[in-house]
Image (spheres, helix red, strand yellow):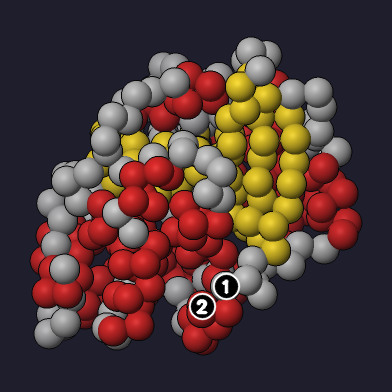
Amino acid sequence: MQTIPIFFSVDEHYVPYLAVAIKSIKDNASTRYVFHIHILNDNISNAGKAGLAAFQSENLKVEFHSLSKKLRCLDGLRSHRFKAFSSLSIYFRLFIPVLFPQYDKGIYLDADIVVPGDISWLWEEPLGDKYIGAVADYSIQHIGPFMKYIDEYVGVDHRRYVNSGVLLMNLKALRENDITGKFMRWLSDYSLGTVAPDQDYLNALCEHHIHYLDPCWNCMPGGSVTQFDNPQIIHFNLAAKPWLNETVPYDEVFWKYALESGYYNEIMARRTAFLTNANAVKAYHEGIDALIRMATELTHSPVSFRLCS
């Protein structure tokens, strides 16, 4: 059977939510393929690895790749703090083409997702010579400062700016066009502040080489009232996470798989602790507000992605 490589990039904190994502993939994926799940991580504990490896079966393999030592070039980024979205692992997806030369194509997924659809249908989507397949990020298209930031600082039409949480990757084309190398050179040569670290770089580097997927492959309740009758992948991006809210769109789908993930009690305990801690809730939302202010400030910066490209 043909193997479909699926990549996740996480730290220890996200292990329970990744378990939910893998459970949903396993329950709904076609038996015509073998799914090789590669977990790019920054030192997940042995207990975390054991919990995730428990999902292995005849057609689903789980493998861990600790990248903190391999990618010492990113050590300087550890000092960056992106408020509510702080993790070095956010950059790991940009290295997939060079770290896995055995694959010409792959799927990257954020861990804050559930997959009620058959992930092999996404794999079968033709990419042609495009670098990536992705969904336009409609979740930010009503936030004025973000739209202006994307248009003027990232240098991409905000209507065509894609979300990097679900990517169908043409790994062969990304390697041949040295996208990872270009990312590293931009990182080295310019001091670019960013609101969405990996996502801004990915959009700037892949502009005009993106295949736009049907939005059902990245249904984002965050910041949007859009609902889909048949979502294939649900992405709880921004603040719209079931474990940080009383209720969000599609959360019943998340809890369905959470119940059988082996981490339900832990996720519920985290949720209760967060929602009953007024200071934690306030700090989280203040972090999101800070990102909006940061977008406004960067829009007026003399150095931008547009000027560097």
**Callout 2: helix, strand or loop?**
helix
Q: Is residue 25 above or below residue 271?
A: above
In whole angstroms, how far apart are the C-alphas of marks 2 and 1? 6 Å
The quarter of the rendered structure image containing the N terminus is: top right
Between 186 and 103, the residue placed more toward the observer is: 103
Between 177 and 267, the residue placed more toward the observer is: 177
Say which mark, if any, is on residue 74: 2
Q: Is residue 165 left or right of residue 47?
A: left
The quarter of the rendered structure image containing the C terminus is: bottom left
Q: State the image coordinates of residue 61 (x, y, percent, origin top left).
A: 75, 35
Q: State the image coordinates of residue 42 (x, y, percent, origin top left).
A: 67, 67
**Residue at position x 34%, y 37% in the image:** 133
- Whether residue 14 is visible to the viewer of this picture, yes or no, is no
Q: Which three-letter amino acid code belongs to the residue tagged 1?
A: Leu
**Residue at position x 28%, y 79% in the image:** 192
Tell me which corner region of the image, top left, top right, bottom left or bottom right, holds residue 275.
bottom right
Say which mark, if any, is on residue 216: none
Tell me which corner region of the image, top left, top right, bottom left or bottom right, holds residue 298.
bottom left
Q: State the image coordinates of residue 67 (x, y, percent, origin top left).
A: 64, 66
Q: Is residue 123 above or below residue 22?
A: above
Q: Which three-letter amino acid code belongs to the residue tagged 2?
A: Leu
Q: State the image coordinates of residue 148 (x, y, percent, origin top left).
A: 14, 62
Query: Which residue is labeled 1 in the image?
Result: 71
**Residue at position x 13%, y 51% in the image:** 157
Between 140 and 11, the residue placed more toward the observer is: 11
Between 294 and 155, the residue placed more toward the observer is: 155
Tag 2 near tag 1, CB within 8 Å: yes
**Residue at position x 20%, y 51% in the image:** 207
